[in-house]
Image: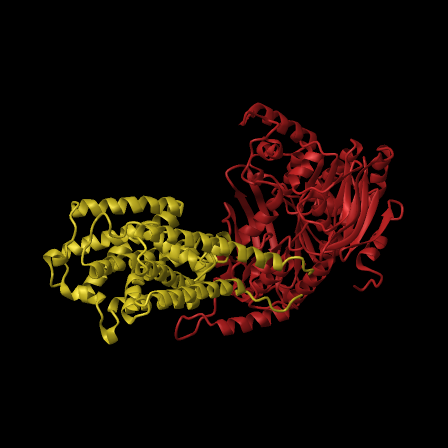
Amino acid sequence: MPEARPGSSVARARDLGLGIALAALVVFSSLTAPQFATAGNLQRIMLDISLLLMVAAGQTMVMLTRNIDLSVGSILGLSGIIVGFYLKDNPETGVLAILSAGVVIGLVLGLVNGVLVAWGRVPAVIATLGTLTVYRGLVFILSGGQQVNPQDIPRHLVAVARPGVLGVPLMVLLAVAVTAAAGLFLRYGRTGRAMYAVGSNPAAARLRGIDADRVILIAYLVTGALSGLAGVLYAARFATVNPASAGTGFELQVIAATVIGGTSVLGGRGGIGGTALGALFLGTVANALAVAGVSGFWQRAVEGFIIVVAVVLDAAVRRAALTGGRGRDV
Amino acid sequence: MAQDARRQGILKARGLTKAFGGPPVLREVDFELFPGEVHAVVGENGAGKSTLLKLLTGVHEPDAGEIAIDGAPVAIPSPAAAQALGIAHIFQEPTLFPDLSVAENIFVGRLPVGERFPVVRWRAMRQEARALLDSIGARLSPEALVGTLSVAEQQLVEIAAALSQKARYVLMDEPTASLTPREVERLFRIIRDLKDRGAGIVFVNHRLEEVFAIADRVTVLRDGGKVGTWTVGEVSRDEVIRAMVGRELARWAKQEMDAERRRGGPAGEVLLEVENLGARGRFAGVSLHVRRGEIVALAGLVGAGRSEVAQAIFGIERFHTGTIRFKGKPVAFRSPREALAAGIAYLPEDRQHQGLILPFPVSGNITLSILGEISRSGWLLRRKEQAMAKEQVERLGVRTPGISTPVQHLSGGNQQKVLVGKLLVTRPEVLILDEPTRGVDVGAKAEIHRLIVELARQGIGVLMISSDLSEVLALADRVLVMRDGRLAGELDRAQATEEAVMRLAVGGAASA
């Protein structure tokens, strides 16, 4: 009987592969486009992926529990619109209050998702596809089809997405802090570990005394809160909130970052480290393509291609790992 | 009968009743568990054994009846409540988390956290896991992913998990169902050790030899009711069997089957011929043949390569050397579909995962591999499907409310029969059966044995893999024994005795 079986070697190999791909991309882009490897461009990448990073951290939790949240883009849009229109009339509102408002709105919307999935027993894809549509509908109803314009966004909010302490925007710091906190929570929190257990074997989790419904609800609440926060940060970053475009299609990027990072759609496997790498990779690819002057349409196709490659590779590595462990006698 | 020393901590259930919509699956059952005893619960599938355990561990709540510890009534509304009372449940199917480490699997739901900050203490957890695993002699790394472990190893993890709860009562549901004899020995050592530490153990099992080897008392359930509880020294195996089945069981002893087999007449021409078959790292030099109307058993320990050989013949696994001839013609099936089309059918060992689609009705399962035959231009002919399913259900004596009942609601023995029916509709000439009666109760086992003999008499050549020696001896015309991926020897019906087969299976030195 073998004594030690390197448990997470598959995960490690995948993280390593993604890291290498990222490094290769960076080296290639730096050599071909001089404006790629500049401090300004690095900051742009980080700003671009901040929202993605945050929301993907939440999505990772949801997916670890063997569920999915398709409504994140709509939550982002709804939170951005509600807060944006409020700021039109109340431009004096403090930054902390604004950010908190985004979180609270997100919590409420996430609660709806969580209740539907955990207690309503509605399959996650259906439930959140529904709320995706409902929330987007609310965006149009509340905004009356009007967008929030740059002059309606207070300066002190826009400053969140501008270089701050040591030249780093507060928004980037916030995204990094959220990601780190989520990582620690999933590694060292009882509830975080329970998310893995619930996704790995839902029936067994219940038998072992884990309140699976509560765990799933928490995952949706966190994702909702982070999406809501991302909504007001979106307003800060782009100084505009358009009901049709704010957060539309964002869920696909979020899921892409999570899946490329190695979190299984079947739950129980993956983590924040991979998701962060995935988001960074996606952001860098988009940036490198833009720097190289490739059109935005091509960017989307490339993004999709990367997702497919990542999933195929993941399946191949996993199969190899499984057959490697077979044929041994007990 | 309780000694004074045992008075503390008696778990007692009275009048437990439970129904799931239909008639009660458990009726007015009294049950008692002393600390420091091993209490076996036996009964046919569907007798209510698992339900009894689930009521005691909060998986289900009883409709009526009460549970008390030392006379004080306790409520067990959830598995967590059972854990808090020190009642651990080791389920029939492992309730583990394949993606998590051994250590985390042991402590899941109660991960150790720091006192000042609620932060999981991984190092302490691994150390504790290591200590627990050592205490039961399990040489497993706490960091290994459970998904990479064998079933036996997974069970050790479950036991370690029960121990980690400092359980006073450990309820085991068929813990030996998928273990090799050596692993069973190890489990028994652990059980005796638990007993010495004062734990009360419930041991649900089908194998009476094991019950008599380990249990202090035995309770027999039948059709949801309790037949009685006996001290093991004061009851015979036959009495227990009689209590279980409630009727004189036709004993499947060798002599009786001998008569059955003789009536079948001599075996016919060679159907399946395998010569020098080998697959790198799994088996080598395997030669065998199966004649029409013959039952050939492939015996040996788990891991000897028996299933691998069968799967190579059937086209599931690759082989690298050797030839297979079917009715004289060389064949090398690249997929089960080809093998089925040629006339070879295979009953897999793991029927839940490889053989049946559990939520599908009986009829859908039976006709699954011959959809082409019961459809016209791509559309299923319902009536044909029903007729075919009905025919098999009657032929095999499947006990089911109807052919539209989902297979998951049938007992293990009846699921097995459905699976056999699914094979028979392909009209195979050679039937390969991998552990045909594993996890099946005594009564159904006898029926399946009669069925196998009957199929042979109808001219089917049967190649049967079995770890159950009494089954091998009762049914087989010839016994081939495998050891470490090779044929260790062949015995004909007259030569085949338990000792002879075992000697070949474990090798010259019987210590193994």
Q: Quadrant of residue B484?
A: bottom right
Q: How many marks?
A: 0
Q: Is residue A186 left or right of residue A52?
A: right
Q: Which chain is drawn using yellow? A: A
- Give x and y (percent) for residue B54: 55, 51
Outermost residue, front side? A32
Q: Quadrant of residue A63?
A: bottom left
Which residue is nearer to you in this view: A250 or A208?
Answer: A250
- Give x and y (percent) for residue A98: 19, 62
- Give x and y (percent) for residue B117: 39, 73
Which residue is nearer to you in this view: A200 or B185?
Answer: A200
Q: Residue at x 74, y 36 (%)?
A: B451
- Give x and y (percent) for residue A326: 64, 57
Q: Is residue A312 above or below residue B441?
A: below
Q: Is residue B328 above or below residue A106?
A: above
In the figure, the shade used to draw chain B is: red
Which residue is nearer to you in this view: B498 or A56?
Answer: A56
Q: Is residue A17 left or right of residue A46?
A: right
Outermost residue, right side? B494
Q: Residue at x 29, y 44 (%)?
A: A133
Quadrant for the C terminus of chain B, please: bottom right
Res. B243 visible in picture: no
Q: Is residue B406 above or below residue B379?
A: below
Quadrant for the N terminus of chain B, please: bottom right
Q: How is the image coloured?
A: by chain
Res. A283 visible in picture: yes
Q: Residue at x 31, y 55 (%)?
A: A224
Q: Residue at x 72, y 51 (%)?
A: B320
